Image (spheres, grey):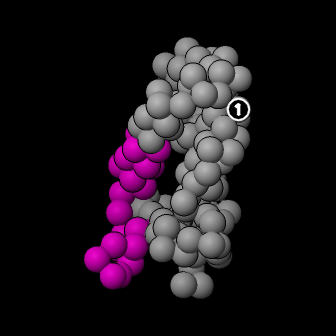
Amino acid sequence: HLTPKDYITCIKDCNHCVKTLIEKVHFNADKPENMNIYLSNIKGKYVMIYKENKWQIQDKKTQVDDLYDYNEFVLEHWYDEYMEKYPDIVESFTKYLNNRDSNTLLNNIKEEILVMLYNKRKMIANE
């Protein structure tokens, strides 16, 4: 359901490109079927995941790692396919690829994803 413009917006967000993609996918009121993860307690160890037609409690760290890895893969795949068509995104994505190996950066982004999952929980919890 994402458009090239959505992907370009994500990639231009450089170090936050994966977080931006997660937000566009999982917190889009037009796609309630993707609104399937939230954090009910910022200090807790678990997130809520909707799968198999019910809400399930899952380990927070594992789920955020998986969410990050999957969405990074999606972005990389889209980038590889369209980088020649949209050359203006190359610099931003190259910068992200160079920076992503910094554990500090990665940990900060994953912490921001957790905060987003918590702050946007009311969008989903009403489902």
Locate residue 16: give its quadrant. Answer: top right
Task: Name the quarter where the C terminus is drawn.
Answer: bottom right
Give, as a single range, the part of the protein colored magenta: 48-71
In the current view of this chain or complex, which residue is farthest to the bottom?
126
Seen in the image, is 63 located left or right of residue 86? left
Q: Is residue 58 left or right of residue 98?
A: left
Circle 1: element type = helix
Residue found 35% across the figure and 81% down from its top: 54
Position of residue 125 measured from the top left corner of the image (x, y, whole percent): 57, 79
Q: Position of residue 13 (x, y in %)?
A: 70, 35
Count of numbered badges drawn on the protein: 1
Q: Is residue 86 above or below residue 61?
A: above
Q: Nearer the viewer, residue 108 or 28?
A: 28
Residue at the image point whose x is 43% and y is 49% from the top:
67
Q: Is residue 30 magenta?
A: no
Pointer 1: what residue? 12
Q: Work out whether residue 46 or residue 12 is closer to the camera in this orientation and state it.
A: 12
Comparing 84 with 118, the one in front is 84
Q: Give the side of residue 6 with respect to residue 65, left or right.
A: right
- The 10 Å Cα crowd at callout 1, few under 14, some 14 to 19, many 20 or more, is many
Quadrant housing the N terminus: bottom right
Residue at image position (55%, 14%) is 98
